[in-house]
Amino acid sequence: MRRSRRAIGRQGDCNARLTGGDLDRHCHLQTSEQSLLRHAMERLNLSARAYHRILRVARTIADLDSAANIGAQHLSEAMAYRNLDRPVL
């Protein structure tokens, strides 16, 4: 519950409801994290929708970690969850 309050206090809504513009404002990434996510997008051929989903999950993971900013470890964990969500062919 406290984590939801953190998100609502920061952006007025929970992380799951952030729009693309909201993600740009509230999920700012440092250069190294931008590079990590860009590389993953290219390597895994991810869509813009997947990009936004990864950012939302990473923001939530950072909140759970009481981190003000999304770090590489938060992005990596979010991407790992994304891979678990993909069907195995």
Image (tube, helix red, strand yellow):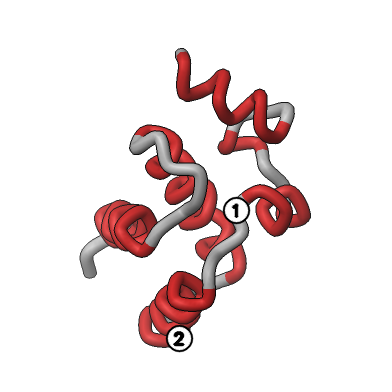
15 above or below 59?
Answer: above
Estimate the x, y position of residue 82 in percent, counting from the top left.
35, 57
The residue under the point 73% across, 48% down is 22
Whether 72 is drawn above or below 44: the answer is: above
Residue drawn at x 22%, y 64% as measured from the top left? 88
The amino acid type found where label 1 is placed reads: Cys
Residue indicated by mark 1: 27
Q: Amino acid at mark 2?
A: Glu
**Circle 1 sits in a helix, a strand or a loop, which is it?**
loop
Q: Tell me, for residue 88, which label it has, or none.
A: none
Kindly check if marks 2 and 1 are in contact, taking CB atoms under 8 A apart as contact.
no
Q: In this rendered view, identify the residue nearer to me: 79 or 10.
A: 10
Residue 34 to residue 78: above or below: below
Q: Residue at x 47, y 57 (%)?
A: 54
Name the residue: 30% across, 58% down.
73
Residue farthest to the right, as pictured: 21
| Residue 17 horizontal/vertical position (percent) | 65, 36
**Frontmost residue, 89 versus 18:** 18
Q: Is residue 41 visible?
A: no
Q: Nearer the viewer, mark 2 or mark 1?
A: 1
Q: CA distance from mark 2 to mark 1?
A: 20 Å
Q: Position of residue 71 (x, y in %)?
A: 40, 58
Q: Which residue is mark 2?
A: 42
Residue 81 at x, y = what percent? 30, 52
Label 2 crowd bin: few (<14), some (14–19), many (20+), radius 10 Å = few
Question: Crowdedness of circle 1 by 10 Å Cα count: few (<14), some, many (20+)?
Answer: some
Quadrant of residue 11 within the rendered picture:
top right
Q: Residue furthest top?
A: 1
Q: Would you identify the image quadrant in which residue 12 lies?
A: top right
- Find numbered disc 2 in the image and state the secondary structure of the residue it sits on: helix
Q: Earlier in the sequence, mark 2 or mark 1?
A: 1
Residue 69 appears left or right of 18: left
